[in-house]
C-alpha cells in the first residue's frame, strides 16, 4: 500500500485518460496507491476541488492558500476553521513562505502564514508547510507561533539537513517528492537517508515535479511508486517496508482512519 501524501488532483492533466477523472483514479488504485491527500492552494477553487473528490472516500483534503497565491486574497482564521470542519479535511495548508517567486516587501506572506498556524491551532489539525528560499523565516515563525502544538509536514522538502532537523525538533514530518530522484539531487538524497523512518513521508506534488524517468512530463499520483523505490534503495530496505512505514506515518499524522478512507 502506497500513499500519496500531497497532490493536487484538480490540476492533474487528464489527457492520457481522455479527460475522465474516474480513469485516473482507477489507474492510481491499480498502481497500488490506496490513499491520497488532495491539497488546497487557493479558496476560489476549493469548492470545485472538494466536489471532484467527493465520490472517492480514499481521498482526504486540506484547506489553505499557497504563499504565492493571489486569487481570492488571504483568508481569516475563521474562514479556514470553518472549512476545516469538513470531516474529509485533515490539515491546514499548504501554507508557508516562498521567497523564490515573490519580490519586494513580503510581510503579507508572513502574516498569511501566521494566520494559517493560528487556524491549525484553533482546530487542532496539522500544518502542510511549503518552504522555498525562506528556511530561516519559516522555522522562526513556526517557533514563534507555537506550531509545535499541532505539528505537520515539511512538504516537498528540498532544504539541508539542519533545516530538516529543526523541523523534526518542532514535531514535524519531512516529505520527499520526485525531486529526490533527480540526478542533481545528491545532497537531498543524503537528507532522505538521515530523516528518521518514523517521521518520513512520500508524495508526488502532482501535477508538478514528476520523478525520473518521467521528469519533464505531467506528474500524477501513481508515480509516487518511483519516489518510494528511490528512498527505499537509499536506505537499503525493501520498498514494501518503506511503503508500510510511510503509510503508518501518514495515518499517525493526519489521523485518517483506514476504515473511513478505504475505497468501496
Image (tube, rainbow, N blue to C red):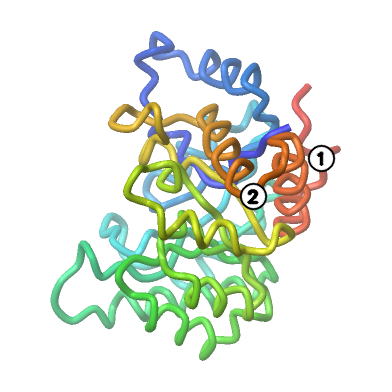
Nearer to us in this view, 263 or 211: 211
Query: Which residue is rendered at x = 38% and y = 59% of the image?
Result: 66
Residue where numbered disc 1 is placed = 258
Q: Nearer the viewer, mark 1 or mark 2?
A: 2
Q: Secondary structure at mark 1?
A: helix
In the rendered image, residue 238, in percent from the top left (x then y), is placed at: 72, 37
Q: How many marks?
A: 2
On the image, which quarter does residue 102 sit in? bottom left
In this rendering, the answer to whether 256 lies above or below 146 is above
Q: CA distance from mark 1 to mark 2?
A: 27 Å
* Residue placed most toward the observer, 42 or 186: 186
Where disc 2 sits, the SS reads helix
Residue 162 coordinates in the image, percent (x, y): 49, 77
| Percent x, y of residue 4 | 59, 40
| Badge 1 density bin: few <14, some 14–19, many ≥20, Cα 10 Å | few
Q: Residue at x 85, y 38 (%)?
A: 259
Q: Is residue 169 left or right of residue 256?
A: left
Residue 235: assigned label = 2
Q: Badge 2: few (under 14), some or many (20 or more) residues near its Cα, within 10 Å?
A: some
Q: Is residue 207 above or below residue 141?
A: above
Where does the image place residue 221, in percent across and percent down from the top left? 52, 31
Amino acid at each position: 500500500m502506497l500513499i500519496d501524501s500531497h497532490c493536487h488532483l484538480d490540476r492533474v492533466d487528464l489527457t492520457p485518460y481522455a479527460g475522465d477523472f474516474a480513469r485516473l483514479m482507477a489507474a492510481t488504485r491499480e498502481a497500488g496507491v490506496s490513499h491520497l491527500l488532495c491539497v488546497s492552494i487557493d479558496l476560489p477553487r476549493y469548492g470545485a476541488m472538494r466536489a471532484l473528490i467527493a465520490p472517492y472516500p480514499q481521498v482526504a483534503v486540506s484547506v489553505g492558500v499557497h504563499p504565492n497565491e493571489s486569487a481570492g486574497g488571504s483568508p481569516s482564521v475563521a474562514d479556514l476553521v470553518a472549512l476545516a470542519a469538513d470531516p474529509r479535511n485533515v490539515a491546514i495548508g499548504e501554507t508557508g513562505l516562498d521567497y523564490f517567486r515573490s519580490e519586494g516587501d513580503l510581510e503579507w506572506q508572513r502574516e498569511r502564514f501566521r494566520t494559517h498556524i493560528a487556524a491549525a491551532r484553533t482546530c487542532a489539525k496539522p500544518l502542510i508547510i511549503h518552504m522555498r528560499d525562506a528556511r530561516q523565516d519559516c522555522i522562526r515563525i513556526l517557533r514563534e507561533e507555537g506550531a509545535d502544538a499541532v505539528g505537520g509536514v515539511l512538504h516537498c522538502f528540498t532544504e539541508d539537513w539542519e533545516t530538516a532537523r529543526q523541523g523534526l525538533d518542532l514535531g514535524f514530518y519531512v516529505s520527499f517528492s520526485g525531486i529526490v530522484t533527480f540526478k542533481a539531487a545528491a545532497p537531498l538524497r543524503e537528507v532522505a537517508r538521515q530523516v528518521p523512518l518514523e517521521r518520513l513521508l512520500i508524495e508526488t506534488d502532482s501535477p508538478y515535479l514528476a520523478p525520473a524517468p518521467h521528469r519533464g512530463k505531467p506528474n500524477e499520483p501513481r508515480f509516487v511508486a518511483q519516489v518510494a523505490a528511490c528512498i527505499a534503495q537509499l536506505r537499503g530496505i525493501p520498498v514494501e517496508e518503506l511503503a508500510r512505514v510511510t503509510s503508518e506515518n501518514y495515518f499517525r499524522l493526519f489521523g485518517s482512519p483506514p476504515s473511513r478512507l478505504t475505497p468501496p
